[in-house]
Image (spheres, grey):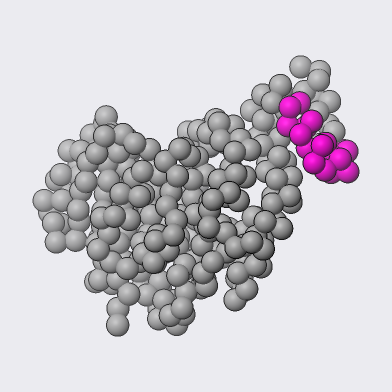
Amino acid sequence: MSAGFSVVIPAYNYGHCIERAVQSVLSQSYSDFEVLVINDGSTDNTDEIMRALENQHSDVLRYIPQVNQGLSAVRNRGIEEARFPWLIFLDADDEMCSEALLALEKCAQESPQARLLIGGHYSCSGDACEKIRPRPITADCKKNFAAFLGKKLTISNGACAMHQQLFATVRYDPNLRHTEDLPVFAHVLANYPVAETPEPIAKIHKHADSMRHDVRAALTVGMSLEERIFDNNGLPEWAQKERKSYRVRRLLSLLKICDRAKSYSDVRDLYRQLFREAPLTALQPRYLRRLLKSLMK
């Protein structure tokens, strides 16, 4: 029996590349799929482009415009609208690799208990693309959860598929405007079996504007991400054992981000928190240097 995939493409002012993303899905040789493009209040020519594409491909393409609500709300809308059991969230500036759906279908058939399918991807900057294979996963939810929080297991939207069953117990938090997928992935890995395919599923394009946005958004979310992951997120009791180590890693991540962004008052504040949580880590030269640099500014 075929799995069937709903590919949800959130769109906000990506008129210059939305057609590329849509066509990369429409060109799949696999037949049991649909494309849902949800326009989150774009002010560019996204609406014009998508209405034309929907007229040409109304059998598999649905275009859903809405007032701006943010990426989490768009993904939740996609969950509600999806007609197939598996969902893929493909960013509007990325592309699906050829035969990606066939690779995911094979993965689902070989691992019928899995509710998250993780594939490889290409990380592209300009014309240069690097093939990234998924890190090995295990049948142990505890190990997968810890590996994910420790960044030893990475999951990229567009290069994974999630079963509709997952969303009976978790949704994307509309209050998170950055890293909104991390609490969802954490919940899934702690509670459900996972499978992987080495085949590349998506081409993920990196560009300067998105990286600058990531810095600003990460600082806005800050340490509240810990609470989003560990509080009221349907985690088993054993998952709380990972909380302290995750808190330290999150502090280190934000410290590095603030240092790169030259937000030196934030560097000093985060360093104080880091010293309280993990003094031996805070006293390592690489982190002391960041503190000293912030004090000289």
Position of 219 relative to 84 (above/below): above
The residue at the point 34 percent across, 36 percent down is 69
Horizontal side of 88 relative to 200 (left or right) equals left
Residue 8 percent coordinates (x, y): 32, 54
For the C terminus, the quadrant is top right
Q: Is residue 4 left or right of residue 214?
A: left
Q: Position of residue 239 (x, y in %)?
A: 65, 60
- As for residue 279 lying within the magenta part, the answer is yes
In which image quadrant can residue 108 be found? Answer: bottom left
- Left or right for 251, reference 279: left
Q: Residue at x 39, y 61 (%)?
A: 168
Q: Residue at x 70, y 30 (%)?
A: 259
* Quadrant for the N terminus in the image: bottom left
- Position of residue 47 relative to residue 203, above or below, is above
Question: Is 174 covered by the magenta stretch?
Answer: no
Q: Is residue 89 above or below residue 44?
A: below
* Quadrant of residue 135 within the rendered picture: bottom right
Which residues fall within the magenta stretch? 268-286
User: Viewer-proximal residue, 280 or 23?
Assistant: 280
Q: Total number of numbered labels?
A: 0
Residue occupying the far top of the picture: 297
Magenta stretch: helix, strand or loop mostly? helix
What residue is at 71 percent from the left and 21 percent from the top? Answer: 265
Residue 100 in sight: no
Residue 213 % position (x, y): 50, 33
Residue 250 visible: yes
Whole-percent x and y of residue 190? 57, 64
